[in-house]
Image (cartoon, coloured by chain):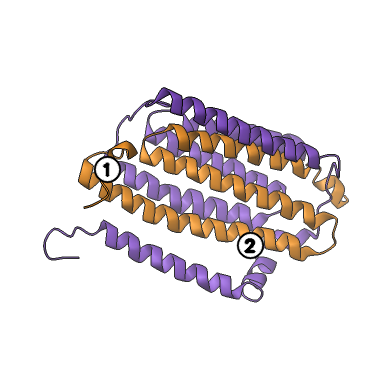
Amino acid sequence: MVTYVFLAAAALAVIFAILTVVPRNPMTNVLSLVVLFFAMAAIFAILGMDFLAAIQVIVYSGATLVLFLFVIMLLNIRKVEPFGSGRRWQAFIGTLVTAGIGAMILVIAGLLLPEHGAVLPGVAEVGTAIPIGRALLSTHLFAFEFITLLLVAAIVGAVYLGSRDDNDSG
Amino acid sequence: MTPAEMVPVPYTWVLALSAVLFAIGAVGVLLRRNGIAIFLSLEIMLNSANLAFAAFAYRFAAGHATAAAALDGQIFVFFIIAVAAAEAAVGLALFIVLHRLKDSIDVDRANILRW
C-alpha cells in the first residue's frame, strides 16, 4: 500500500518537475513546482519524516514559492522564450551532459541496491519535531545560530538590492 | 504491525527519484534563458539533494541502530531549506534589479558587468 503511494508521489513529482522546466508561461512553472513540493512532502511523510514534510509545505510552498509568484506578478512577466531556444549546440551538449549525470547517479543507486533491498525504518519518533528541535538546540546549536545570521544577511541584502538608489536613498 | 511492514520502500528508489529530479533540474538550468525558470530549476535540484539526504537518513536509521545518523540527515535538509529561502530572497531581488535595468529577465541580456 505504502509502496503504491510512494510510486504515485514519485510519478507526480517527475511529471510536475518536467512541467516546471518545459512550459513557457512562468506562472505554470511556479504552480507546477508547488505540486512537486507537495509530492515531495508526501515522500518525506512516507519515509517517516513528519517534521520535514511539514516544513516542506510551510516554508517551501508557503513562503518561497509565494515570493516567486509575487516577483512574477510584480514584474508582469508574460510568456518568455521557448524551452531550449538559443544556441542549438548548447542545448545539445546540455541535454547530453545531464543525461550522463542522471545515468551515472542511477547506476550508482543500482550498485547500492543489492546491499539491502528493503530498509527497516528506525526509531519511530526520530522524524518528529521533538528530537529534531532538541538536536538543533544542542548538537547543532552553532550551525543553527549561523543560519539565523545567514537569513538576516540575506534579508539585508535583498532590501538593499530592492531599494531604488536614484538620488538620495541608498 | 512491525516497522518492516509499515515502510516497505527501498531507499534506492528514493535515490533514483532524486537522480531523475536532479537531471530534470540540470536540464532546466542549462536550457532555459529566463531567469525565473532557471531559478525554479535550481530549486528542483536543491530538492533532489534534500531527497538524497532523506534517503540516506532513512537508510541509516535502519541498520546501524543509531538514531543520530537519521537525525543528522534531516537536520541537513532543514538547513538546506533555510539556505534555499535565503538564496531565493537575494536572487529574486537581483532579478528585480535586472528587470529595472534591462526591462527583461533574460539572462543573456545581463551582459555588462557594471552599473
Residue underneath mark 2: B75
Residue A88 on image: x %, y %: 42, 23
Rendered hue of chain B is orange
Residue B62 on image: x %, y %: 82, 55
Q: Are marks 1 and 2 in contact (CB under 8 Å)?
A: no
Q: Is residue A9 visible?
A: no
Residue A105 on image: x %, y %: 68, 39
- Picture residue at 61% right of the left edge, 75% below the top: A137
Q: Is residue B105 left or right of residue A101?
A: left
The answer to which quarter of the image holds residue B72 is bottom right
Identify the residue at the far left of this view: A167
The answer to which quarter of the image holds residue B87 is bottom left
Identify the residue at the far top of this view: A88
Q: Label 2: few (<14), some or many (≥20) within 10 Å?
A: many
Residue B40 on image: x %, y %: 45, 42
How far apart in space, not on screen, are marks 1 and 2 (Cα)? 35 Å
The answer to which quarter of the image holds residue A76 is top left
Q: Label 1: few (<14), some or many (≥20) within 10 Å?
A: some
